[in-house]
Amino acid sequence: MAGRRPPARPTREDIIGASEGSIADLGEFGLIGEMAARMPPGPGTIVGIGDDAAVLAAPDGRIVATTDFLLEGRHFRRDWAGPRDVGHRAAARSLADVAAMGAVPTALLVAFAAPPELPASWARDLAAGLAAECARAGASVAGGDVARSGTVLLAVTGLGDLRGREPVTRARARPGDVVAVAGPLGRSAAGLALLEAGLAAGPADLVAAHLRPAPPYDAGPEAASLGATAMIDVSDGLLADLGHVAAASDVAIDVRAAALDTAALEPAVRALEAAAGAPEPAARAPGPAACRPEPASRPEPAACAASRPAPGPGDLARGPGGHPAALEWALTGGEDHSLAATFPPGTPLPARWTVIGAVREGRGVLVDGRRRPGAPGWDHFR
């Protein structure tokens, strides 16, 4: 992709003849050609895939930039997620970060590494998923690179345009502000719990929420226009991410548990209980300590799934202290990539923004006025 110019573009016959084989059959530049054919340039792309670097229009004069990894075995498993799912997720992670700054997403740069035996059709469908999620945000893939690797890896850089607005950072929340969220909370975590329990069939909407999160990208610029004082996308868990806002702004944020829509997550709790054959927790040995994030009710990373027993209702259907897992998912689940923002009191918010708490004097994040024990969300190095 952008960063290398192929010396000779493969013929259509070359690509068709190899397309049902592996990416090794396509070769580096054949792979680039196959993927580029599925990722059309966007309106702001002046020079796109196929040259040494991309050239993009920057009408605002400022560029919002972010980067994310998506690693096989850590962020996704190929036996659970199809290539289009992986493409959607890879794009959503960076596009949501751009939107959380109050910017309009414009382009992605995607570095893709994979084993040579990976089917060519997998790479084509990955490109289609990337393009489709970009289209949801009004962006496009402008370039990148390909390489050989033992597992599938994507490194995605997202770019955006502020369109004359000031960026919305994490650092300007003030006591008295309201805290609101656009988009769902806990649905991705519930979907992951279902997949780890072997319930890929459903509830289908929750499994889909994990495989293909759908961030409300336009809510970011909307929040900026409404005067949002701080904003973040919910990638590591609501409490963890609001904790970043609280720390950057030197305030306390108090979340009202009753304001969270946990009813939408209850079907996953019922499915897990039914699959376990009992509504109450069953005792069993924990998995390896290195693979057990706290609290224990939070679904473990996919990379640890093979090293621990199958989930039981005690792990996924109840949280610590008897709290429903649905509330646990909403508070700490992450990966919905919804937007959480703070607004001055009295700001008229559109219907898609749900007020879930308030900013107060102090430090840290509270739930119903109290410090909550346990981890607030995901941490790669814990």
Image (spheres, rainbow, N blue to C red):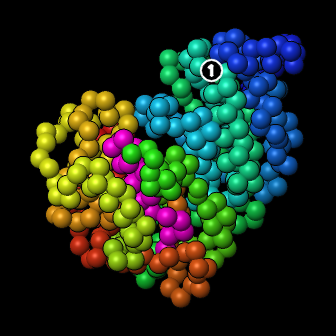
243 over 311 or under it: above or below? below
Which type of secondary structure does the marked residue at label 1 adopt? loop
State the image quarter where residue 122 is shown: top right
226 over 131 or under it: above or below? below
Front residue (pair 314, 251): 314
Query: Which image quadrant: the C terminus?
Result: top left
Front residue (pair 11, 382): 11
Position of 79 with respect to 158 (left or right) is left
Indicate whether residue 197 is drawn in magenta.
yes
Q: Name the spot of residue 174 as percent of width and height, x first.
A: 45, 76
Tell me if I can see residue 167 in this picture. Answer: no
Residue at left 87%, top 19%? 12
State the image quarter where residue 248 is shown: bottom left
Residue at left 65%, top 34%? 126
Indicate whether residue 64 is drawn in magenta.
no
359 over 273 or under it: above or below? below
Front residue (pair 116, 367): 116
Q: Which residues are magenta?
A: 180-198
265 over 106 or under it: above or below? below
Mark 1: which amino acid? Pro
Position of 197 with respect to 159 (left or right) is left
Q: Name the spot of residue 66 as percent of width and height, x first.
A: 60, 45
Residue at image mark 1? 119
Q: Name the spot of residue 299 as percent of width and height, x first.
A: 32, 47
